[in-house]
Image (cartoon, rainbow, N blue to C red):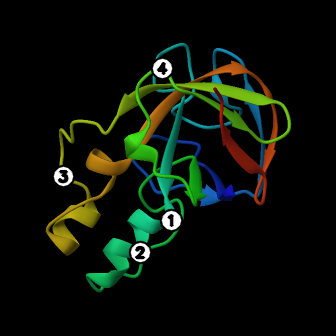
Amino acid sequence: MAKIVAVCSSERKGMRKKNVGTALLKANYGLEGDAHAGAWHRQVSLLALESIRKMRDLGLQVGPGDFAENLTTEGIDLVSLPIGTKLRLGPQGLAEVTQIGKECHSKCAIYYQAGDCVMPKEGIFVRVLTGGPISVGDEIEVMP
């Protein structure tokens, strides 16, 4: 079973996000209160805990939110999901994968510490189709 292990948000862009535990997904917007939310294709970012563990194996003290992801997941191979895949996020939320990875225009602190960063290669982005509450422990389901 795939699940959400952290729900992270920040008030400003360019900073690590903090696990807030529970938030509201808003349709055509993203995570309420997050600096990256808005009317564009990268409303919510997801990164697998398995990817974060790769950076820990390099000796970094990192955890959920440190890569500026909104949702840290476990038990789902995010980068294998084709663009257009629909995901049930929590009891009501529905999102569509819009982008796999991203171009890193300016190297972040993680890159300089480890010589690499997982978010540009292993993070994914979704737009919210149907909103609703989302919390740590909620299931993620790939929709047929």
* Quadrant including the C terminus: top right
For residue 49, which numbered disc appears in the image? Answer: 1
Which badge, 1 or 3, comes first in the chain's sequence? 1
Q: Which residue is the site of mark 3?
A: 107
Residue assigned mark 4: 84
With 106 as the anchor, is 121 left or right in this view?
Answer: right
Front of the two marks 4 and 1:
4
| Three-letter amino acid code of the residue under disc 1 | Leu
58 and 21: which is toward the camera: 58
Callout 3: SS: loop
How far apart are labels 4 and 3 at the CA level? 28 Å
How many other residues sit within 10 Å of disc 4, few (<14), some (14-19) or many (≥20)? Answer: few
Please rate how many residues cluster around mark 1, counting C-alpha atoms within 10 Å: few if below 14, some from 14 to 19, many from 20.
some
Front: mark 1 or 3: 1
Check contact, mark 1 vs mark 3: CB within 8 A. no
**What element does badge 4 sit on?**
loop
Mark in the foreground, 3 or 2: 2
Ranked by sequence position, the earlier of labels 2 and 4 is 2
Furthest residue toward front: 144
Front in this rendered view, residue 67 or 13: 67
Amino acid type, mark 3: Lys
Give residue 51's position: percent from left, percent from top: 39, 64
Q: Compare marks 3 and 2 and give the one earlier in the sequence.
A: 2
Foreground mark, 2 or 4, reads 4
- Cα separation between marks 3 and 2: 20 Å
Q: Label 4 amino acid? A: Gly
Q: Residue at x 46, y 33 (%)?
A: 125
Asked if marks 4 and 3 touch (Cβ < 8 Å), the reply is no
Q: Relative to 71, does residue 127 appear above or below in the rendering?
A: above
| Label 2 sits on residue | 53
